[in-house]
Image (cartoon, grey):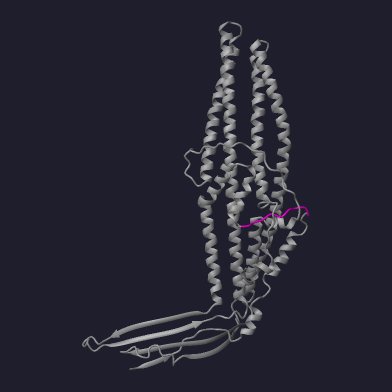
């Protein structure tokens, strides 16, 4: 028997104390200092809103309308929407990336067992069997802190992806609610157009009778025919618009568009606007702002990694390994007598690279500045979304009061006009003018009611969720160590 013992390495930190001191370098804090500067000057009257990550919270947000069908549709969309399923796969990919980065904190253990036989070609029976067994492990010590920075970068990337997923989920829920209310508005507008065509037909019968009796000229008969045809066209257009709205809702639910939904709901009154207070937390609870903050933290961590490149790189390894080979027997194959240990350290420095390292550092610094500016613009855009959504919502509320008055008055004018026309004291042209005014006012009131609901959803989304609850936001402490 021939036995040959060989060693293979397992790296571990010879300078563990130095590693523990350098492993938690202040990477997140500069990012938060820079972000705080970008948030300076914001008003002091904005409220807190949460990003819980719980789909039940998103679903319950739409329970304020008291419509069970709407709530069930939101839940269905969050379960079935393909875009949302794709977004959750992005989150999982980020989780796996973080897991891969964190795996470097643990020893890597490898083992192998092999067998081989060989013999001369002119004497195949005279063969030799060779067996091998090897065991080794490796461990990288984060002496310079680059592993810790990589973990922070991966953790921030994961949380950023989660924020994007949360934003996608809220956008889908809002899309479903808007599509649902659009269907109801379409039904109301179609009912209005059908009532209009019934009135036009009744009026045309009176007009035809008067023309046949010779009491009116042909121009009034032709005018009646024209308005009746326009009413028929309006019904056809409203029916097509309603079908399109139903298909849009089916698509939002993740269904194939077949115009098979039966909607029984009504347009509710929108909830009141939320109270405002605590500005920074309101804006920072928005998923897009959360994602921008975490992208900043990730960029700062990557800059920290790049900034280490010009400095001497200190590495230490502790090698512990075993490699056994035997011939024609497996006896002593797993003998650990040959286990060997070695310790080593190295210090390396790039002497000349034509400016490549410096270019990488400058690129990282530029990316950091760009991320900071994008974050600042995200904050401004978020602020603008809230201000604009709130102003539009209040404006639509004021318009609703005026439109309600106009519609009520127009309906009374129409009632009187139709009585006068039946009595023969009102011209057909004046009747159509009054009728068109009344129908336009009622249609505008319906459209405004739907627009107020859409705008409440926009305001709700701009505030980042339920504005009556609070939730913690990212801090330097919670971001450190990949939390």
Residue appearing at x 74%, y 59% in the figure: 39
In the picture, the quarter occupied by the N terminus is: bottom left
The quarter of the picture where residue 399 lies is: top right
Q: Give 93 or 430, whichever is nearer the viewer.
A: 93
Residue appearing at x 65%, y 27% in the figure: 440
The quarter of the picture where residue 211 lies is: top right
- Vertical comparison of 467 with 196: above or below: below
Q: Give 390 or 266, whichever is nearer the viewer.
A: 266
* Magenta residues, dominant SS class: loop
Q: Residue 11 vs residue 17: left or right? A: left
**Is residue 284 something one can see in this rendering?**
yes
Q: Position of residue 86 (x, y in %)?
A: 51, 55
**Is residue 359 something one can see in this rendering?**
no
The quarter of the picture where residue 416 lies is: top right
Q: Residue 90 vs residue 474: left or right? A: left
Q: Residue 3 vs residue 438: left or right? A: left
Q: Position of residue 151 (x, y in %)?
A: 59, 71
In the picture, the quarter occupied by the C terminus is: bottom right
Q: How many marks?
A: 0
- Vertical comparison of 272 with 309: above or below: above
Q: Which residues make up the magenta segment?
A: 44-52
Residue appearing at x 61%, y 8% in the figure: 216
User: Does the magenta-highlighted stretch encompass residue 319?
Assistant: no
Q: Position of residue 411 (x, y in %)?
A: 68, 23
Q: Give 370 or 387, whichever is nearer the viewer.
A: 387
Q: Residue 475 vs residue 239: left or right? A: right
- Vertical comparison of 379 with 153: above or below: above
Q: Give 302 or 360, whichever is nearer the viewer.
A: 302
- Vertical comparison of 401 with 207: above or below: below
| Residue at the extreme top | 214
Q: Position of residue 319 (x, y in %)?
A: 51, 87
């Amino acid at each position: 028997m021939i036995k040959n013992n060989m060693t293979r390495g397992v790296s571990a930190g010879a300078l563990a104390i130095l590693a523990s001191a350098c492993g938690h370098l202040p990477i997140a804090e500069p990012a938060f200092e820079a972000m705080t500067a970008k948030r300076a000057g914001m008003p002091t009257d904005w409220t807190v809103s949460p990003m819980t990550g719980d789909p039940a919270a998103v679903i319950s947000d739409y329970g304020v309308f008291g419509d069970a069908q709407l709530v069930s549709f939101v839940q269905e969309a969050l379960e079935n929407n393909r875009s949302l399923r794709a977004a959750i796969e992005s989150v999982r990919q980020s989780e796996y990336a973080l897991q891969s980065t964190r795996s470097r904190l643990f020893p890597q253990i490898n083992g192998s067992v092999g067998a081989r036989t060989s013999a001369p070609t002119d004497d195949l029976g005279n063969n030799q069997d060779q067996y091998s067994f090897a065991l080794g492990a490796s461990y990288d010590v984060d002496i310079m802190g680059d592993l810790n920075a990589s973990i922070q970068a991966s953790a921030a990337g994961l949380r950023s992806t989660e924020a994007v997923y949360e934003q996608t989920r809220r956008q889908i829920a809002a899309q479903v609610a808007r599509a649902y209310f659009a269907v109801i508005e379409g039904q109301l507008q179609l009912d209005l157009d059908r009532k209009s065509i019934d009135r036009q037909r009744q009026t045309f019968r009176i007009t035809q009778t008067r023309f046949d009796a010779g009491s009116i000229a042909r121009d009034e008969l032709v005018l009646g025919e024209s308005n009746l045809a326009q009413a028929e066209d309006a019904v056809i257009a409203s029916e097509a618009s309603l079908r399109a709205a139903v298909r849009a809702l089916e698509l939002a639910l993740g269904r194939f568009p077949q115009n098979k939904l039966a909607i029984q709901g009504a347009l509710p009154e929108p909830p009141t606007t939320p109270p405002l207070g605590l500005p920074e937390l309101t804006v920072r609870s928005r998923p897009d702002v959360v994602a921008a903050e975490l992208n900043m933290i990730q960029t700062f961590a990557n800059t920290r990694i790049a900034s280490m490149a010009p400095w001497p790189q200190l590495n230490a390894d502790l090698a512990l390994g075993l490699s056994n080979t035997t011939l024609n027997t497996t006896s002593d194959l797993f003998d650990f007598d040959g286990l060997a240990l070695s310790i080593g350290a190295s210090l390396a420095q790039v002497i000349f690279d034509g400016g490549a390292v410096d270019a990488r550092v400058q690129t990282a610094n530029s990316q950091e500045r760009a991320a900071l500016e994008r974050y600042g613009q995200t904050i401004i855009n978020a602020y603008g979304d809230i201000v604009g959504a709130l102003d539009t919502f209040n404006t639509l509320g004021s318009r609703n009061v005026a439109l309600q008055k106009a519609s009520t008055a127009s309906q009374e004018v129409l009632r009187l006009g139709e009585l006068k026309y039946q009595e023969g004291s009102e011209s057909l042209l004046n009747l159509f003018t009054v009728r068109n005014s009344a129908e336009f006012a009622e249609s505008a009131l319906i459209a405004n009611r739907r627009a107020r609901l859409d705008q409440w959803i926009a305001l709700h989304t701009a505030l980042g969720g339920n504005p009556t609850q609070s939730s913690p936001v990212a801090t330097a402490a919670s971001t450190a160590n990949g939390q």
